[in-house]
Amino acid sequence: MTKTHYHAIGKKTVRKDGLAKVTGQEIYTSDLFLPRMLHGRVLRSPYPHARVKKIDTRSAEALGAVCITFKEVPDITYAERIVTIPQKTFKDRHVLTDHPRHVGEAVAAVAAETAELAEKALGLIRVEYERLPALFDAVEAMKPESIALYETIFFGQEELRVSNNVAATREIIEGDIEKGFLESEIIVEEEFRTGRVYHAQMETKSVVCQPEADGGITVWTTTQTIHNVRQLLGEIFKIPLNKVNVKKISVGGAFGSSIQMNSVVPIGVALALKARRPVKIVLTREEDMVDHCKYPSYIRLKLGAKKDGKLMAGHMRVIVDIGAHNTQAYPLLGCMAGWWVSLYRLPHLKFEGKAVYTNKVPACAMQGFGNPQVTFAVESLMEILAEILGMDSIDLRLKNYVGLGETFWGQGPTVRSIIQSCGVEEMLLKGAELSGWKERKKTLEGTIRRGLGMARGFHTSGAGAPMPGEVIDYSGSIVKINEDGSVDFMTALMDLGGGTLDALAKIVAEELKVPLEKVGISSVDTRTTVYDVCTHATRGIYCGGGALHKVTAQAKSKLLEFASRILQAPPHALKIEIDEEAGQGMIYVEGVPGKRISVGEVAKTAQINNWGTIAAVDSLRQVNCPPTFNAQFIEVEVNTETGVIRPVRAVLCSDAGQVINPDLAEGQLYGGLYRGLGYALLEDTDYDKETGELKNRGLFTDFKMLTAEEIPRLEDIQTYFTHTREPTGPFGAKGIGEAALNPTAAAVVNAIYDAIGIRFTKIPVTPEMVLKALNEKRNQG
Amino acid sequence: MEYYRPQHLKRVLQLLGGGKGKAKLIAGGTNVIPDLRGKTIQPDALIDLSHLKSLSYIKEGNKSIRLGALTTIAQMASSKVIKNYAPILSEAAQQLGNPLVRNRATIGGNLSDASPAADTAPPLLALDARIITENATNNKKAIPIDQFFKGPNQTVLKRDEMIKEIIVPKWTSPHIKTAYIKLGLRNSMSISVISMALWIDVEEMFCKQIRIGLGAVAPTPIRALKTEEMVTGKEITPDLIEACGSELKKEVRPITDIRASAEYRREMASVLFKRLIERVTFEQRE
């Protein structure tokens, strides 16, 4: 690695939106108030499966409320998530429905002068439902005698019959698994289950819609993609896109829950269009909890290996209970296959995935898009295999991992590229050293037992590849150098709270050698930006930042061209450096005294001489989605009397390439660990099979998440970043976010095994499960 | 729904006795508001007690300490008087909910809500507290806490009656020890899976008297009377502790709910009892 001198990249800096956020001055959708704005509320089905026989809104309207039902919204079947290409997108949604398929599905909505009046009006809508039998289990749902939740759905433009409630399937075969297993000397197989976790993003989904005099609409909403929201609204309401403007506004966390256009958005728009007044809807927590959740999974995994540990074959079967809507389980299944096969080399493999409809809250992407589920299974089974082989599991991993120069396809079979930077070995060895992996001792006595576990994983930085696959992935930006040497940049890329846009500002500052505080992140909307697909798939810095880097370099060319006119030297003879004292980027001719001018002077001279603004606009499709690798070593204490598991120490290793901001990068690792521990030990949702309701009734009281008291203390968490650079990334950077959570559950379960000799294959691992297993073990022993 | 915010106790009792449909008292609202939102209660009127400052106090008397019904959990958690004379109540208060909840929730509310998991109940049971109530005709009653709860969210309070004060007796014997444990799905902001409070008069491992208060293992917070009987007047030995653990498992009547199964709660009753006994007899065994 060459030593590079950066003034912004890799430095700890205070994020630009930090002050506004910690002092409560940042504006979110729910903070907006527009003149003449009405407050909207949504009427939701109390039943998991029903037909609306009759709906009467007269009493609500008599109160002065504006009401809409399924009869008054565009009759269109749409897909809320459009990052997949249209031909491969499944559609089964309606703005409002007369056929609710889960408790909480929207059937009508009202808007009124005040929130109280809207609430009152909502209570006055009379609905006559015909209850239908409901399904709460994916395996049950696939039985031929089960009721069909959908007759047909759309796949692209084509109407598709749904059989056995299977929403999507995927089968991927490489090599010949029968041959592979025949050649294997050891075969291991296990079933794994993961929970149905609620995203619990701080901001509940919200929308404000203002109808414009020209027939257009302006929309502020919780989203990870303003352009996809714009395009979908244009399609649903038949408004030309130039009249649909979606404003970018801060998001209070997302974790994947707003990759799709949220179902509340078109409801808010329909109300506003009918009322001809602005309408605001902010979901209550109870509503938000019946809006989305993480994909749960049932995974059956079989691996075959030679006695020396070389993997020969693998067979993975997956069933995903997607709930009432298909928020694109087809790419999910492709990705689940991809996460699996890109972890370890498998000469022969077969993946079979099924996504199944049930009458539960619709599942969608959440931190990893199937990756934590798959990595939990794979990294548990690798540990089982290592034990049978009598090998250190780290050696087994080192022998088989997919690394530098190899093809990988994390984002599914159509998104293939070559790995160009890889810190796997560095992380496994360094992590082992830092955690005391080799020295760990088995103490299977006493009430409190300690165990150390590890797991590795990765996530892709975006979904780019040389060939256009099933998923759209590109970004764009505008960069403009102001007349005092400061810079504005405009991007549709969303910052979901992790500091993505702050990282982007640093990329601009570094490329132009201007001070970070002179780079401004512009308030933008869909009118003032070029397309960016979405902030998802850990793509913000690598793809969004990559595009911005490209555009900044174009602006820099123009800057140097103007500077060359002034300095009377060709552009390629010019160098640029930061002058911290002057607070300017300085352009100079090396070795020639006096030939030096600031970026601001160039821009001002260009203005005075009418040369024009120094600006650029362009898009970039990254032709790679480099894996950001990760390894975690987690130590737990298991109380054998209560079954309570307490994570006490962690070593978190990350191969994110060049780190942009060490503080925020560490924050991502802490956040991933935190949520991963919750995934492993606590977070889940369950249903009352009689009523079809969430047992937690949409309240945080009974959707428990960990607190600071249950996770390792900060001083007991060590982070380590590898010395890698991604040649295709902006300044050598890759992504980080989702990778930070993917291996956690497996590391925890492996640690529990180390502590008490019991392997759990279902998460979350609750104290009850631990105690029961300990008792069973005691009775057997 | 009607809403009243009376300034005086007298008016509250009048409203309660007024008989206009179902009235619900609301103090901190940490139970009532979620119940209203979840539609598990649908009262005709809400009577807001938050302005009755006269019922918010912690007073030390010669033989007892007295807590006004509207004393917040936060006040209890930081009270020196409670820490000195009812340390297990202090601990329970410190572990209830989170700071936001503790700032709003009141002891009167916690008890009259009568959740089987009410955090202040087990220590008050172990401390043998009395609940002073008053009704619309100004009749006052002193109800021993072990006779106060009737079932999940049910108490002996009549429609026109409310809790005014809680009296916690001071103890005189120097051999009294107390201890408290709450087990939840996490360490804070948690409704208990099981909680247990112990009050014991023990000298050189001989137990003169014992009271065990339990939460979340029966339709109401309970005393473990049979287990208490097994220990009273006995020398505490490992065998006796073991036997008591088994008895407790039989004595509790837990249910399976979203937080834990009945089996787990039963198992934990025994585990927690052992821990508490070990804690209070630790010095003596040394």
Image (cartoon, coloured by chain):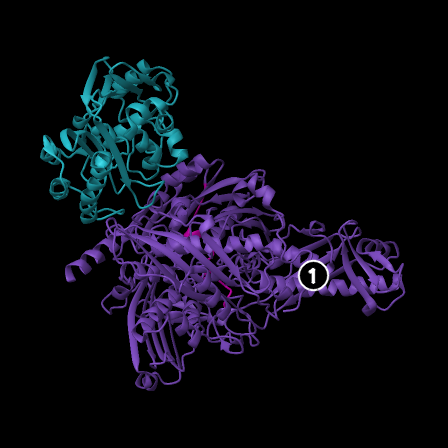
Chain colours: A purple, B cyan
Camera-side residue of B269 and A458: B269
Where residue B123 appears, as percent x and y from the top left, is 25, 30
Q: Nearer the viewer, residue B193 or A123?
A: B193
Q: To which residue does mark 1 refer? A: A5
Q: Is A547 displayed left or right of A581 in the figure?
A: left
Q: Main secondary structure of the magenta part?
A: loop
Q: Which residues are magenta?
A: A66-84
Q: For the residue labelled by badge 1, is the local secondary structure a helix, a strand or a loop?
A: loop
* Residue B199 visible at all: yes
Q: Quadrant of the N terminus of chain A?
A: bottom right
**Where A534 falls versus B233 (above or below)?**
below
Residue A160: say if magenta: no
Please state the total of marks drawn on the protein image: 1
| Crowd band around label 1 with a 10 angstrom C-alpha radius: few (<14), some (14–19), many (20+) | few
Q: Position of residue B281 (x, y in %)?
A: 21, 35
In the figure, residue B187 lies in which quadrant? top left
Question: Residue A447 in the image: x percent, y percent?
Answer: 25, 50
Which one is in front, A621 or A234? Answer: A621
> What residue appears at the point 78 percent right and 61 percent down from the top-left corner?
A576
- Residue type for callout 1: His
Q: Quadrant of the C terminus of chain A?
A: bottom left
Residue A9, picture quadrant: bottom right
Q: Quadrant of residue B246?
A: top left
Q: Is residue A76 magenta?
A: yes
Residue A15, compared with residue B153, is above or below; it is below
Judge from the rendering whether residue A453 lies leftward or rightward of residue B263; answer left or right.
right
Give the image location of residue A403, x and y in percent. 50, 75
Q: Mark yes or no: residue A323 visible.
A: no
